Amino acid sequence: MGDSVSPSRTFEDCFGETPKPTRGTRALPRIVRWAFAERSKQNCVWHERFCQKGMRVLIADDQRSVGMTLAAMVANCQHEVVEVVASGLEAIQAYEKHKPDVVLMDYWMAKLNGATACRNILAKDPAARVILVSGWEPDYDLAADYGAISLLSKPVDRQRLEAALAGAAQMLAF
């Protein structure tokens, strides 16, 4: 990967000189290359943080077997499961305790459902990323109304889970 940019590279590392103010557009290609290098540097940092090291994920599902299955799938996707809880109320408490990168939460749960817990978490932390999971016919508009970034229908397959987690990682990176 000869043209890859590591997070510590600068304009000088990429082009052998510091940018100088010039007249006209002769410097434009070099500036564009520098901007691309800076963007690549951000992407390298994002890739290292969220793809290689993984995100911290909180899982909430009132069916223990489903919660543990989701935890195993998340771990297989190279992410860290901080805790598995069984209600929306426990999810709110665990979110405050762990401050995970993503919450993967069942839409319908006893004590406090996932949709209401999602709204509560986002009220306290607008930057929170919540993915709702539903065994019922998915209502994507309703999930978005509650502030969820994604809605997965059960049974969740690894490919859809990975795509949802990758989307959450990209949102966190910027």
Image: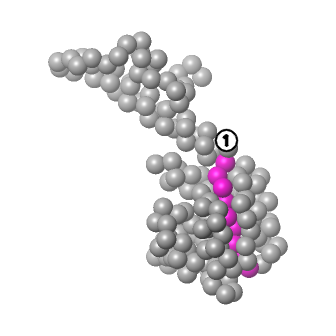
| Residue located farthest toward the right when viewing the structure as drawn | 65
Residue at x 57% of width, y 66% of height: 130
Magenta stretch: includes residue 58: yes
Identify which residue, 20 or 1, lies in the foreground: 20
Q: Residues within 10 Å of mark 1 (few under 14, many from 20)?
A: few
Identify which residue, 146 or 96, lies in the foreground: 96
> Image quarter for residue 24?
top left
> Image quarter for residue 151?
bottom right
Residue 1 percent location from the top left of the image: 60, 22
Q: Secondary structure at mark 1?
A: helix
What's drawn in magenta, residue-wise?
Answer: 54-62
In this picture, residue 52 sits left or right of residue 139: right
Magenta stretch: includes residue 132: no
Residue at x 32% of width, y 24% of height: 31
Residue 62 percent location from the top left of the image: 74, 79
Residue 150 percent location from the top left of the image: 55, 66
Q: In the rendered structure, which amino acid carries the disc numbered 1? A: Gln
